[in-house]
Amino acid sequence: MVKTMTPSKELLSKYTVRIKEITPAVTHKQLFRRRRCYLGISIGNPMFRGDYFEVLLHWISANFDACMIVIGDYLQRFNEHIFYGRSSEDAIRQALALGDQFLMENSRCLSAMPPGQFQISRWNSYLDSPEYRNARSILDRLFLDSYEFRASLDRTSAGFISRQMKHKKAPAVDRQTAIALSTQYLLEEIAVFAVLVERGWTVEVYPGSEIPVLLDIAKGKFAHIPEFLKQRMNVELEIKKRN
């Protein structure tokens, strides 16, 4: 009797997943000694939809004991302002609605994962924590005191805006405002990453490249960053359809 493949196995056979980069650089053996990871969901990124997202979850399930899925919905409010010119209240409302939509669209594949292996959190749940306030205070001071840190943030923000424009997604605000808002996005994002590491989620898995300012942090370019960021590790995955 021929055993039929389950839909998940049929799906996995159509894709390849490989580790493209680990930052800071370590061996795969050293990486997988860390048994917990987090997955930050970038709202609007097609890698977090459909088959790609399901394949990503299966890869994490096979390689880590536990994963915190962090839905970056409230963080998306900055992009709603930058690219759609929404007011603060409208940007928040739309960002949270996109988080709800993400959960609804992916409820099937999330519920199909092994029980207890994945946890789900939403962005604004971190922002009132003492860990966040501490990390953000350190980053804000560094932003004021360090030209090198400001320059790294500016380069990262300017690069993000330029990439979006190349993809025909022009800002609805002037470039200076767009970069300033993107920098606030980054400061908030980095502070939340510090919180996650402090809580034991030291490995970030992401289907895309590490951003320049986080590469600079990993290289030790800034002395006075939140201490927990020094323990953070980023795994850049490449997910491709087989030919």
Image (cartoon, rainbow, N blue to C red):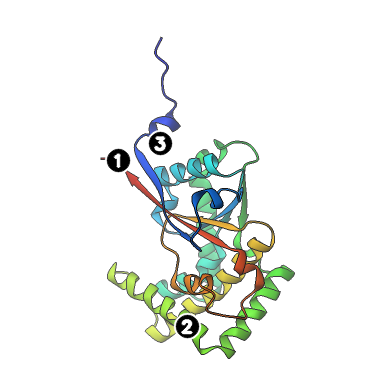
Callout 3: SS: helix
Closer to the chain start, of discs 2 and 1, is 2
User: What amino acid type should be assigned to the residue bearing mark 3?
Assistant: Leu
- Residue at left offset 50%, top offset 39%: 109
The residue that mark 1 highlights is 242
- Residue at left offset 61%, top offset 83%: 140
The residue that mark 3 highlights is 12
User: What amino acid type should be assigned to the residue bearing mark 2?
Assistant: Ala
Quadrant of the rendered image containing residue 231: bottom right
Q: Which mark is residue 200?
A: none
> Going by the picture, which residue comes out furthest to the right?
130
User: What amino acid type should be assigned to the residue bearing mark 1?
Assistant: Arg
- Residue at left offset 65%, top offset 80%: 138
Give how far across and how far down residue 71 sits, in percent.
55, 57
Give how far across and how far down residue 60 sits, in percent.
52, 45
Closer to the chain start, of discs 1 and 3, is 3
> Going by the picture, which residue comes out furthest to the top?
1
The relative height of residue 224 versus residue 121 in the rendered view (above or below) is below
Closer to the chain start, of discs 3 and 2, is 3
